[in-house]
Amino acid sequence: MAHRRIVAFTLCYSQCSAAQDMNLSRIFASNILRYLNFIWHSSPKWSILSILLVVLQGVLPLITLYLVKLAVDSVALHGYDTILGFSSVTFFIVLLGLATLFEAVSSLTDRLVSLIQGSLLMERMYDMLHTKSAEVDLEYYESSNYYDALHRAQQEVPLRPTRVLANLRQLVQSGISIVAVGGLLLWLHWSVVFVLLGAALPAALVRIIYAKKLHYWERQRTPKEREASYLNWMLTRDGYAKEIRLFDLASLFKERFRNTQSQILREKVSLQSKRSVSELFTLSSAICVSFGLLGYLALRTAQGLMSLGDLVMFYAAVQRGQMLLRQVLFSIADLYEDNLFLSNLYEFLELKPKLKETSHPKLLNQRLKTGIVFDQVSFQYPGDLKPVLQDINLTIRPGEHIALVGENGAGKTTLVKLLCRLYDPTSGAITLDGVDIRDYSTKQLRRNISVVFQDYARYQLSARENIWLGNIDVPPNGKRLGTAVSKAGADGVISQLANGYDTILGKWFEGGQELSAGEWQKIAIARAFLHDGQIIVLDEPGSALDPKAEYEIFEQFHQLVKGKTTVLISHRLATVKMANRIYVLKTGRIVEFGTHNELLRQSGTYAWMFETQARRYR
């Protein structure tokens, strides 16, 4: 009984292993075909030229081999002292020289073509990576798995595409050469080809086995590698520079970086050492086969069964055949390894959007007619244990200015993210003019909303570009840009820059000029005004402004946004007094709403917050 169980288990394991290998083979073939499609579409003309050069270089070695045989046989037959012998040998040597020169020219041309083709392929790969990075929904940024996938994809793009291209070229070129050389060796004896193949196979199998192990190890090590990258980023970028010096953190972070890197290195060296030992055994067997065949050829020549030219040609063919077989098998093994690692890139490129676009988007009115409605809206971030927003009911009429106030974490910014459709509600619906925002084109929806988030971007570009990025459809030198700057009160910021609008902001690039937090915020507000959406959202717009600058902006704020539907988020309650309505959020729910005076009369949360802040200035 036990024996039957063992046999049954063995058969089952064999069948499962075979099925897995078949599946891997299909995936391998599918990925290679997909990659060939990438290569072709990145540069069709260069691909055609590359194919021609690969075929040419595959045939040239056989021609060279045959010319060597003819030259040696000519010397053996005619000698070099007679006129016939001299002219015959010289003729073959000249042909051999021309063939060698032609081979060198084609090799140099091929190198140049490979460089161009590889660069164009890399450009296409980066374009796909950047496109996908810009397309994925914000929800992915809530997951460490996404960052692992992105890290692995970014690791593969600089190296893997050109390596796959080189391996494919090598496989085709060596394959063409080996067909020709194999035919020559079959002429010598049919067993020679199989002996060479048997000697080369173990090395290829070792590569495939360790490619699997390396790929598995790389995937397991991704979090550690990201940790090392993060430590390096903190030690070398400006975001943490002040605290690292003030708290003397450099030694701590450097030690953690070294420890993480050392652990990764030890594991990689251990894996590579085992691979090297295995490859040494396979290489030794291949060397024994090579010299064994040399002895066989020498014996046949001594017996008069082959000419001296045949000896030279066949031994060169054996050497080249062995090399070509190794190249073919190693290229296949390397392609297998590359395929495993390219799956990291494909895994990232195949991420599916969480926000579904409607196939028949409705047109958004150029001016809101009935306004914005949040109907029983709740939302919970992926992986969080409790919702951020619960049963939000909120109406914003066209042209109305409302304010959202509350403690940190109350859900104010999340509400805005839902309005911009950076996320979809977990339940409930948000409508614009009675239409669910999911029925509009996301691009059109966002084009109608101007937002300045609290964590606004600081582009290390010129001041003009920093503002123009708010609406790249308008001329960067047009009047609208200047108007947006004036509305944001950023005129003074621009006038103090060394080269005005053309000054690079930030210190990352030469000639850059750093701004204060408040000055950066004014630039961000100008960018939002240039966007010119019919809905304006300002998330803590005065957080980095001094009291004077904040007063100047909000003194004219309601005049600037006249006719616009406006949402203002602020902790400073003095800035929200003029809002038509104020909503107070607490733990994800609206607990109060009304005008400033109405909320003060209620003596609730808002009145307490306002009184607490007012006390500071008495």
Image (cartoon, rainbow, N blue to C red):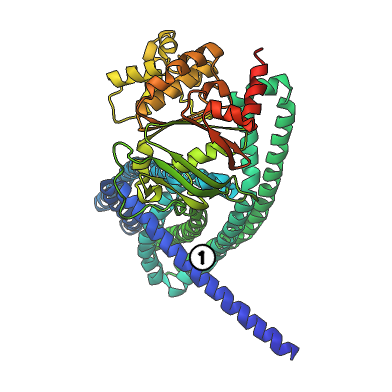
Q: Residues within 10 Å of mark 1 (few under 14, many from 20)?
A: some
* Position of 294 relative to 218 (above/below): below
Question: What quarter of the picture does the C terminus occupy?
Answer: top right
Q: Residue placed at 60% from the left, 52% from the top?
A: 219
For this view, does 277 lie left or right of residue 182? right
For this view, does 1 lie left or right of residue 34? right
Residue designated by label 1:
293
- Residue 311 can be seen in this image: no
x then y, percent, for residue 445: 36, 41
* Position of 431 relative to 340 (above/below): above
Q: Residue placed at 62% from the left, 83% from the top?
A: 11
Mark 1, secondary structure of its residue: helix
Looking at the rendered structure, the kind of residue marked 1 is: Leu
Question: What quarter of the picture does the N terminus occupy?
Answer: bottom right
Q: 313 and 192: which one is in front?
A: 192
Q: 191 and 213: which one is in front?
A: 213
For this view, does 362 lie left or right of residue 375? left
- Residue 350 can be seen in this image: yes
Number of marks in the image?
A: 1
